[in-house]
Image: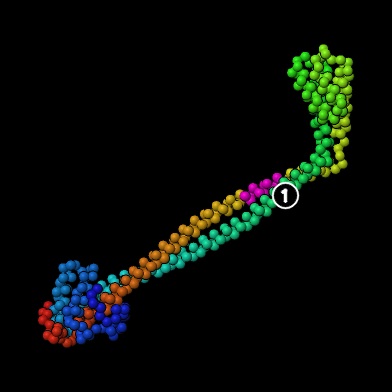
Amino acid sequence: GGETFGNSKGGPDAIEREAKRPRLADVDSEADLLKALLSALDRARDVSSTGREMLKRMARGCLGTPARRRHDTQVQVAAMLREVLEGVAGDLRSAADASKARAADAAAGEVLRREELQTKKEAAATHQRNMKALQADWARDNLALENARNRLDAAKAERERLDGEWLMAGERRTALASGMEAHVEPLLTGIDDDVAREVSAKEVENLAVRAKLERSLLDAFTVAARKHPRLREQFDSLIFGQVRAGFKQHSLELEALANSPPEGAQERAVAIDTAQAGLKAARVQMAVTAKALRAAEFAIWEAEGILDGAGDALEEAAAIVDAAGGATEEDTRSLDDFLGGAMAAFEVLEGREDEVREHGAVSGVADV
């Protein structure tokens, strides 16, 4: 505080401060020196307000007297003033050192935050690369799954084309036997109910179509089957007999077909089993890849959040560095101002040998 004398950035170096100490001829008056000195006493923490006021009053008489003319009490006052001022300088130097230490800690923290941010960036990049690799795996496995489906469909189509009749022979023979028992025999015996007779007639007609009976026989059966049993003629009974015989012949043909597997049927069955196993394996692999892909997506989302947090932490650390740097500059400037101002003024006044004149007159400051 107060007017600065000499080099404001001289620091605690006494030699440099001595070389740049102000001379009495460089200032307007003793009052300017005393003003700088006395204002600095307010910064003394270890001095009571009473003691501080006493020193201010005594300083005027003590320092207003040339060093060679001071009596013992004035010499003691000068020593007390130096001790107090050096205490203030020590406090200011400690504050500046503490600020520098905090600034160094803040800078180290910023470096650490920057390193952490870089680590998080690398982790996020790794997750992105992993995601791309998994996306490629997913595309590959999806194609493999599609190919497995196509192979199974092709194997089934091939077996249907070459083995379909043989595979269905047993089922058709069973269906034919059930239809004959449920509908052909009742019609031959006679069904009095018109609705039930109509239902059975249609079922038998469907069986006749699947059995590939002659069209003329089917047409004749269509008429005969719908007649009331009491109205049937001998020709109708003949038609029923031929239909039954045709069904029995077809049943024998189906039995023979069921017992005669086509050439290569076993290999085609194995091909279907193999294709089904391949499809199952492809589905399992696809599920594994899809699960890994979902996990990778979550990992990227989490890594991006962590990266944002690291960026915020770095910004906060940079702000702390700026604040610490500002505080360090301020505390260092306060120390330099004190050393180049109040302390330099004290040294000038404390060591002077000449009479101080203010505006050409001898100062009238009284001795202690």
Q: Is residue 244 visible to the viewer in this orientation of the structure? A: no
**184 relative position to 298: left or right:** right
Front one among 312 and 354: 312
Residue at 22% x, 85% y: name it. 26
- Residue 129 in the image: above or below residue 360: above
Task: Quadrant for residue 205, please give it.
Answer: top right
Q: Report the side of 111 relative to 363 (left or right).
A: right
Q: Is residue 284 magenta?
A: yes
Q: Residue at x 80, y 31 (%)?
A: 171
Quadrant in the picture for residue 326: bottom left
Judge whether 233 appears above or below 266 on screen: above
Please say if 69 is above or below 213: below
In this view, the residue in front, 241 or 227, is: 227
60 part of magenta stretch: no
x then y, percent, for residue 340 = 27, 79
Q: Quadrant of the N terminus?
A: bottom left
Looking at the image, which residue sits at the far top?
230
Q: Where on the picture, by quarter, is residue 12?
A: bottom left
Give how far across and how far down residue 334 sits, in percent: 29, 73
* Residue at screen point 82% across, 22% down: 222
What's the coloring here? rainbow
The residue pinned by badge 1 equals 147
In the rendered image, the vertical position of residue 229 relative to residue 132, given as above or below: above
Tell me the amino acid under the disc marked 1.
Asn
> Could you tell me if residue 140 is visible in this image?
yes
Which residue occupies the foreground of this view, 245 or 261? 245
Q: Nearer the viewer, residue 184 or 13?
A: 184
Assign the magenta stretch its main secondary structure: helix
Q: Which residues are magenta?
A: 278-290
